[in-house]
Image (spheres, rainbow, N blue to C red):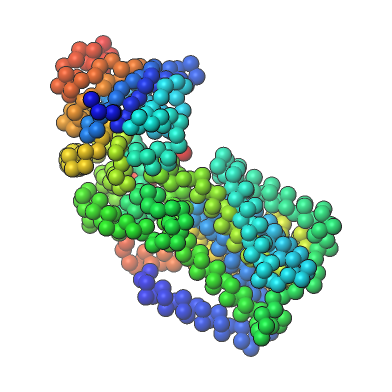
Amino acid sequence: MAAWLRRILIVALITLAIAAPLGQGNYIIYVMTSWLVFSVAAMGLNLTLGYAGQISLAQASFMAIGAYTTALLTLAGWHWLAAMPLGVLACFVVGFGLGYPALRVKGHFLAFVTLAFNTLVFLVLRNEEWLTGGTYGLVGIPRPNLGLFSTMRSLPFYYFTLTVTIIAALAMWGIVRSPWGRAFRALRENPIRAESLGVDTRRITLLAFAIGSMYGGLAGALIASLVQFIEPGSFGLAHSLRILLMVAVGGAGYFFGPFLGAGVVILLPEILRFTEGYYLIIYAVLVIVMLIFVPTGMIGMWGRIRDRFIARPVARADLQQGAQLK
Amino acid sequence: MSQPVLSVRSIVKTFGGIKAVRGVSFDVHKGEILGLIGPNGSGKSTLFNCILGQLEPDAGQVHVYGRDVSGLRPSKLNRLGVGRTFQQLSVFPKMSVFDNIVLAGQEHRGTMLSRLFGPSDAGLTADAERMISFFRLDHLRGTLAGSLSYGQQKLLDAAMAFMAGPALVLLDEPAGGVNLTMLAHLRERLAAYNAEHGTTFVVIEHNMEFVMSLCTRVIVLAEGAVIAEGTPDEIRSNQTVIDAYLGG
């Protein structure tokens, strides 16, 4: 996509995101805020999985670590802006540690390791009642107080979340455009060749997990303030799978994929509510059909339409054996 | 004689009960182009992988400019100035030719943090353009590497191995599957690079004409051991080598 067209689209999308909640009720604004929060979480998983090629089924557990750290600290009187970085830092450290198994196991085995980690975090949150409140969770989590700009009402909190999302997206843009981004893609496409060119694939793998987890932590810090109540069930395996679905539906390895994917997974069921009892069935069928016919996600769908009308070179499938070196 | 760029000492590697490499030793000096040939199963690729840290030898040492690099990870070896190509196509298919070349040099620029906060090309655009021009890939600069022909990918693979300005490059069957026109082009470019930069090459190859016309010295392996060593002309007329290839 041409740079000028991309800029125009970004400005149009931000304008739309600013204008869309105006005049809407609290529920619609809540759904839109959820879309932004899950876009942040999916952005992180997109780095780990889409760019660096490391499967993770534990993104919801990082949301949990970010959410509980922020909740506990804000309930203890800390400001959100002081508590959130600690939650994000905790996710960086834990994510870095979770990356170590990825140095030894790949593919399905790595998926099971991360799945086990998600379950472990869930059990800790449920069983350590003295700290987490157990199944009753934590209630009354305060929203950030920004002086003149109070986020207690839903619309200001939406704009606060939008601002945080834009900052997080800009940081992610900087990462994927930097030599680190190139190294992440090299890790995904051909780790042995990348290593032979001086890329420290061990460090890059760990960083892919750590940075992706940070975004999960940030999303957790936001959701704790959005809902003002958290409990372990909100961060179970099903939620990690949901975030994985967002990345797959939007387009793994594409910058705007997570926004589109989170849009489909969060917003589409709401749009389909007019079908009453059938909305989940229709939603599931739509997702299945899309993943069968366009496995590269919604951005891949746009690529298919474009390729039909504009001739451009594509990577040849018959000459890629080198990329499959293991 | 000056200190060798690469010194391989008594490398042994076994797989189960099979001795793939049996105490191979040799030196390679600055600017040399050493050919490593032998019939299939003679241990060439295993020896290569032991030198390059992809396999851990059971015994023996590898020295680069006198420094023991045995067991060093490939990325560290690369940062010490050792480049390589692979027998199979080994480019990054979904990146452009330009990005492939920049990637091949970026880890040699600055620190980890400067690569995060610095320019996206790691300050390598001019060097990358020069390398692309040297291998005459200018017209393919923005093309996805995966959409290139086999021969073009082989050229790109070689260009990537040279991007960081290595002192030593190990080329694993660079001529494999390349058509005659592209082969002549590849040989001419490798010879030109060697002449211009004095870079040392070690080449594994089955294409005898390619080896004999490019290399200054040839080592022949059979059943994991060195059976002959000499200039291309000496090797061509060596009866032991002829017997090994013909199964005599």
Residue nearest the viewer, comparing B58 with B222: B58
Residue B10: give x, y in percent of width and height. 38, 19
Relative side of B139 to B41, left or right? left
Q: Quadrant of residue A112?
A: top right
Q: Quadrant of the N terminus of chain A?
A: bottom left
- Can you name the residue that lies furthest to the bottom here? A23
Does B106 appear above or below A246? above
Does A161 appear above or below B107? below
Q: Is residue B122 visible?
A: yes
- Can you name the residue that lies furthest to the front here? B2
Q: Quadrant of residue A32?
A: bottom right
Residue drawn at 46 percent across, 31 percent down: B71
Does A50 appear above or below B82? below
Residue drawn at 44 percent across, 76 percent down: A9
Residue A257: give x, y in percent of width and height. 51, 65
Residue B132: give x, y in percent of width and height. 25, 52
Residue nearest the viewer, comparing A67 with B26: B26
Residue drawn at 65 percent across, 84 percent down: A149
Does A130 appear above or below A78? above
Residue nearest the viewer, comparing A14 with B182: A14
Q: Is residue B20 visible?
A: no
Residue drawn at 75 percent across, 54 percent down: A122
Residue B29: give x, y in percent of width and height. 25, 29
Relative side of B224 to A180, left or right? left
